[in-house]
Amino acid sequence: MLNTIQKYFLKRNNFNKCFPTTKIIRLKANKFSTVSTEIQTDQTEPSFLKMLHQYFFNACALNPEIPDHYIQIVKYCKSIVNFNFPLVRDDGRVESISAFRAHHSTHILPVKGGTRFSSTISVDETQALAFLMTIKCSVHNLPYGGAFGGVQIDPLKYSDKELFRITRRYTLELAKKNFIGPGIDVNAPDMGTNQWIMDCMKSTYFNLYGERDINAIGCVTGKSLNQGGIDGRAEGPGLGVCIGLREICNNEPLCKKLGITTGLKDKKFIIQGLGNVGYWCAVFLCESGAILVGVVESNSSVYNEHGMNPTDIKEYKTKNKTLSGFTGATESFDADSNPAEVLERSCDIIVPSALEKTINSSNASKLKCKIIAEAANGPVTVRAEQILEQKGVIIIPDIVINAGGVTVSYFEWLKNLEHKQLGLLIRRFEHKSKHELYDLLSVCYDKDDVDKLKGPSEKDLVYSGLDEIMSNTMTEVIKQAHEKHISLRMAAYGIAIQRYYASFILTGITI
């Protein structure tokens, strides 16, 4: 165990040069020693799973009160299922489909995590994402363990009927193995899946257990509204990123160190990956006064230093399947002209919202931003983070800033367990009571202001709850980073590990 910690430990350039450096590493149980701050000369990037373990070990080294034998417990997934099932294609061919689901930790139930349809999904990636979900839920104090799963297909190569059959069978297999249920494992959409896939999963599980389990509808989140979904789920992940950036940019000492003004107004940002998360993040940032200067996709990119409208870009991309030729841009690039070049343009904020490890040792030194907000899971590699921190770039880690999806999913799960719309019992009362107050103060108000006195809608409550959780977490992480002179990532991991350890102490680790 100790050799593993030594092997994976890398020096953290603490809190992105905004605070003094702490040169420590755990060499023995609860013992520390100084190490070099130089960037590794090894150009090899670790796998996604090893990268997360490396972050974890680094954070453990900064929390000497946690015994090493507890660290070993947290490292591994508790349960993993890897199964295959046949699919009859529309043309009559039979194909074998591989699928996975991992439960990283069951110290809190249910476990929670996405379901990904991707030709590249693997057991290692599934374990890594399940591990990440445990840490993410812990740092935001959400009552879930971590899980993740996926089906090894390219969804674009299958018809809707075939995807329907795949989803049904995947759900049946999970149910047979006790890997799905409102009190066991709550699935959610991820890359390659959407609310329709979640509706199919919910329908399958409900048909199996609905008459025996009154909460069966809560087996998945991210559903359509008429299937028990929640208003605000689609934009939740992007809004969460915007809230996190708002808290960072409102921190006056941090902005002073970065040499930028406080607030989001007039901050120039670049989005990498204009999917659901990237699009809504761009919309909310623009509404806050920030300026979208660049968008990067795998096959194209666009740039305009004076700003662009994210909705116009989204509509153009949907229609043309590319960003190349977008008229609102002063420069556009196709697949043959290095679209990733736009990431190297000068800006205040870069939001990588595509796949993991997209910012790595090959491009990190070329970036000219002040802040990176990890809207995707693991978009910045370990070596890239070292390079960026030595340049003074703030990295807001994925476990903090991209938790908008799981947070709103938590609200949806609560709605399903309560069997009523959020705010249903209080909205009319608040509307009436505020009208009575309005009548008393009517001499001071115009009649047009009456709409402001309505009670909160479900979306209002979702937005408000998300703001509350994200703001509290960001405040806590920034405070820990400042007090301990460490990076935001190490502060977030430290908070998560401390909560995880507290659960072990209070409830035990075995039965």
Image (cartoon, rainbow, N blue to C red):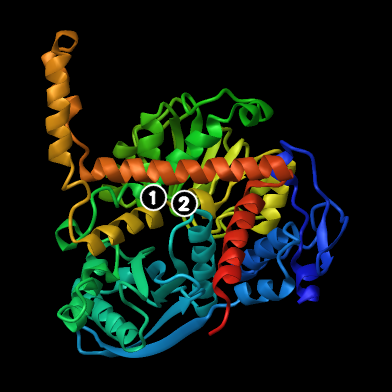
Q: Alpha-carbon distance for marks 1 and 2? A: 6 Å
Q: Can residue 239 be seen in this snapshot? A: no
Residue 253 percent coordinates (x, y):
65, 28
Q: Is residue 144 left or right of residue 161?
A: right
Q: Is residue 280 left or right of residue 66?
A: left
Q: Which residue is mark 1?
A: 237
Q: Quadrant of residue 69?
A: bottom right
Secondary structure state at the residue bearing disc 1: helix
Residue 474 percent coordinates (x, y):
53, 43
Please determine whether, in this image, residue 472 is positioned above or below residue 105.
Answer: above
* Badge 1: residue crowd in 10 Å (few <14, some 14–19, many ≥20): many
Residue 287 percent coordinates (x, y):
36, 30
Q: Is residue 392 left or right of residue 255?
A: right
Q: Residue at x 17, y 63 (%)?
A: 227
The three-letter code of the residue at mark 2 reads Asn
Quarter in which the N terminus is drawn: bottom right
The three-letter code of the residue at mark 1 reads Pro
Q: Which residue is mark 2?
A: 402
Q: Residue at x 22, y 69 (%)?
A: 217
Q: Residue at x 14, y 33 (%)?
A: 431
Q: Nearer the viewer, residue 322 or 180?
A: 180
Q: Quadrant of residue 5?
A: bottom right
Looking at the rendered structure, the number of numbered marks drawn on it comes to: 2
Q: Are marks 1 and 2 in contact (CB under 8 Å)?
A: yes
Q: Can residue 499 be seen in this snapshot? A: yes
Residue 273 percent coordinates (x, y):
43, 50
* Upstream in sequence: badge 1 or badge 2: 1
